Image (cartoon, rainbow, N blue to C red):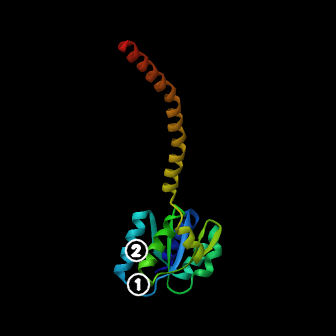
Amino acid sequence: MERAEKREFVTELNEVFKASGSVVVAHYAGVTVAQMNDFRSKMRAAGGTVKVAKNRLAKIALQGTESEGMSNLFKGQTLIAYSEDPIVAPKVVMDFAKTNDKIVVLGGAMGATTLNAEAVKSLATLPSLDELRAKLLGMIQTPATRIAGVVQAPASQLARVFAAYAKKDEAA
């Protein structure tokens, strides 16, 4: 890489660290190209990105961001997985790490909070923002349907009473 390319890469990575909902750092030593391509495609499909960066450049890019506390994670062959949704990157990385033992999660960051490997694992078990929105919408709609049922109940009971009186009058 030339100096100008490095400067551009550091600037781009700095913007990524500022804008991402979560960042996960992991070792990837021994992962084949095919496995890495599969991992990248899974991450892209979920709405995240995977980058391999030189540790020195990543540490420079971290300076001045909220995530600066995770700079000590950049040792050895590391990759960076990030996404705007705070749950997507940890979830995809942990799912891929289950099937590939060469991916070792070191930690990460979510805003100003530095996460260790256990925190990333627990974050991966949470539902995504879309799932939470769906649950919240369901919880909001449930009382509305119950209210509609309660409001309709007296009217339907009155209709049944009128129908019963009509049958009684016809029988008489």
Q: Residue furthest left?
A: 34
Image side of residue 80 versus residue 112, left or right: left
Q: Position of residue 161 (x, y in %)?
A: 46, 21
Q: Earlier in the sequence, mark 1 or mark 2?
A: 1
Tally the marks.
Answer: 2
Q: Secondary structure under badge 2?
A: helix
The x, y position of residue 154, in whole percent, is 51, 26
The residue sitting at the front extreme is: 172
**Quarter-wise, where is residue 159 in the image?**
top left
Q: Image quadrant for the C terminus?
A: top left
Q: Is residue 96 left or right of residue 154?
A: left
Asked if the residues shown at circle 1 and circle 2 are in contact, with their CB atoms under 8 angstroms apart, the answer is yes
- Give the image location of residue 111, x and y in percent: 62, 65
Residue beneath disc 1: 31
Q: Nearer the viewer, residue 162 or 121?
A: 162
Q: Position of residue 130 (x, y in %)?
A: 48, 55
Question: Dot 2, how many residues are within 10 Å of its Cα: few (below 14), some (14-19), or many (20+)?
Answer: many
- Residue 119, quarter of the rendered image: bottom right
Q: Is residue 16 above or below residue 150?
A: below
Name the residue carrying label 2: 39
Measure the alpha-carbon separation of dots 1 and 2.
10 Å
Q: Is residue 27 above or below residue 39?
A: below
Give amino acid for label 1: Val
Q: Residues within 10 Å of mark 1 (few under 14, many from 20)?
A: few
Can residue 77 be spotted in the picture? yes
Residue 11 visible? The answer is no
Residue occupying image coordinates x 59% and y 76%: 118
Q: Which mark is residue 90?
A: none
The front one of 65 and 112 is 112
Give the residue type that dot 2 points to.
Phe
| 118 is higher (above) or lower (below) than 149 | below
Element under label 1?
Answer: loop
